[in-house]
Image (cartoon, rainbow, N blue to C red):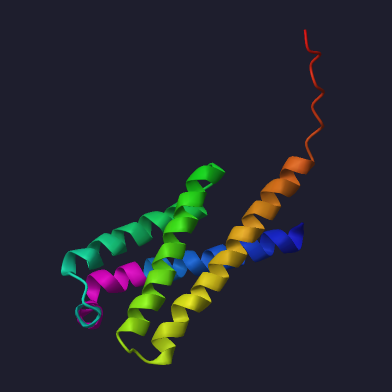
Amino acid sequence: MKALKITYWTTTAIVALMMVYSAYAYLTQAAVLQAFQHLGFPNYFRIELAVAKLIGAVLLLMPLAARIKEWAYAGFAFTFISAFIAHTASGDPMANRIMPIIFLAILIVSYVTFHKSNSAIGNREPAKTKSPVL
């Protein structure tokens, strides 16, 4: 159980930190603006994506209902897959293509350990008895 928690928090922290850093870069670095133009995305999308990444990072780190975290995980999965497709379609170098896949793998580990730790916690609760059918 301890290793599971360590793995969960380590992978979740890596994803959250990367998303906060990339959101900051999206809003402050001219090179990122040029990269979005190179990929053919409008400028407003860069800002929307930065805000979404900040919100998603907060949602992953906060103790919230699993359903809410599911949306954050899904959003990041779509983001990483879309980034891989965009960099591939633009003919970018392999390093630009592979990084979203690496972060997708880290996200998957976070997701799996999140669910395993939730099910392990759920298994420690006493079994509920069924009420008789009347």
The quarter of the displayed image where residue 80 is located:
bottom left
Q: Residue at x 37, y 54 (%)?
A: 55
Q: In the displayed structure, does residue 37 sit left or right of residue 12?
A: left
Q: Residue at x 22, y 83 (%)?
A: 38
41 relative to 50, above or below:
below
Residue 12: percent from the left, percent from the top? 55, 63
Residue 122: percent from the left, percent from the top? 73, 41
- Quadrant location, the N terminus: bottom right
Residue 57 seen: no
Residue 34: percent from the left, percent from the top? 20, 82
Q: Is residue 35 magenta?
A: yes
Residue 19: percent from the left, percent from the top? 41, 67
Q: In the displayed structure, does residue 44 sit left or right of residue 73?
A: left
Q: Residue at x 43, y 89 (%)?
A: 95
Over which residues does the magenta segment extend? 22-36
Q: How many marks?
A: 0
